[in-house]
Amino acid sequence: MLFANPCVFVLLLFSDTLAAAALKHQHILELNIAGANAILGGAKEVQKSLKRAEIIPTVVDDFVPSALLEVRWSSGEAALGNTLKPKKLEDAPSISLSDLSGHRDHGAEFVITLTDPDAPSRKDPKWSEFCHWIATARGLSPETTDGTPETSPRFGPAHLNEVMPYKPPGPPEDTGKHRYVFLVLVAKNGTTEELHLSKPSDRKHWGYDTDEDETRGVRDWAEENGLIPVAANFIYAKH
Ligand SMILES: *[C@@H]1O[C@H](CO)[C@@H](O)[C@H](O)[C@H]1NC(C)=O
C-alpha cells in the first residue's frame, strides 16, 4: 500500500541513495580517523617508551614525536628499547621516516643522530654523552593524495651525508647495558635551505667542556644548531 504513493517511493529511493553515500563517506572518515589514531597512538607510544627509559629528560626535553623512525641493520632493527648484540651493529643502519604531521614542509633537510648517554656506563657516565653518528638527508616522506602518510624511501648509508661518521656501538666489558638513542632533528625555523651544521670536536661529551658530574650532548648540539627533535628510537646493547 505504501508504494501506491509515488512520492513516498521516490523519497525512499532517494533516502537510500543518501544513506549509501553517507555510509561511503563514513567509511572513508573512519579509515582516516583510524589512521590518525594509529599515528597518534604511535607517537604517544614512542614518548612513553622514551620516558620509561629516562631518555626524556636525560637526553632530550619532553616532546611528542611528529614522525616515526625506523632504524634497520642487515640483521636487526631498533624497536624502542630492544636489546641487540654489538656484532650486529657494525655497519651504519638504513633509516626511514614516516611523517605524521601532514603540514611540515617536505623537502627540508633532516638530521639523524646517534648518542650514548651511558658512556662508559650508566652508573658512571663520565664521557656522556658519546656521539656515535650525525648524518643528514633531504625530504620527509611524501603524502599520498588521500592524506595518509606514506613511508619514505629508506635512506641507506650511501644516501646520507655524514657530518660525524658512524662509529658502531662498542660498549666496554662490565659496563652493563647502554642506551643507544637515535634522534631525528629538523630546523626549528622550518627552512628548506641547506643546513650548515657544526661538527663536534670530539665524540666524548660531543666535544663540549663539562664539569665533573655534568653530561652534555645532543641537546646542546641541537640547540647550538637551531634544531628540534621530531622522531626517536633506541636500542640497548652491552658487551
Ligand atoms: C634557520 O635555521 C638554520 C639552522 O639553524 C639556519 O642555518 C638558518 O640561517 C635559519 N634561517 C633563517 C631564515 O632564520
Image: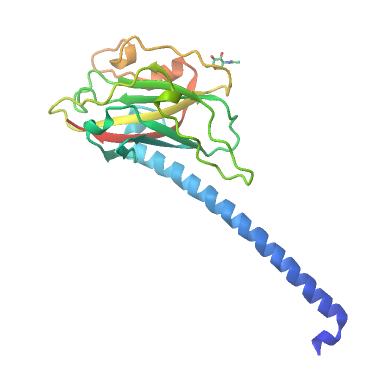
Q: Quadrant of the N terminus?
A: bottom right
Where in the figure is residue 90, as x and y percent of width and height? 27, 27
The image position of residue 15, as x and y in percent, is: 76, 71
Above or below: residue 188 compared with residue 177: above
- Residue at 49% across / 49% down in the picture? 38
Instruction: Kindly tell me whether residue 65 is visible in this rendering.
Output: no
The correct choice, above or below, for 126 with respect to 94 in the image is above
Q: Position of residue 7 (x, y in %)?
A: 87, 78
Task: Name the colour scheme.
Answer: rainbow
Q: Say whether residue 211 is left or right of residue 196.
A: left
Ligand 1: which quarter? Answer: top right
Res 106 seen here: yes
Q: Nearer the viewer, residue 209 or 157?
A: 157
The image position of residue 162, as x and y in percent, is 41, 18
Q: How many tags in the picture?
A: 0
Q: Residue furthest bottom?
A: 1
What is the quadrant of the C terminus in the image?
A: top left
Instruction: Using the rendered view, name the quadrant where residue 54 is placed.
Output: top left
- Residue at 30 percent of width and 27 percent of height: 91
The residue sitting at 58% across, 18% down in the picture is 193
Residue, far right:
6
Residue at 85% across, 87% down = 4
Quarter of the rendering containing residue 113: top left
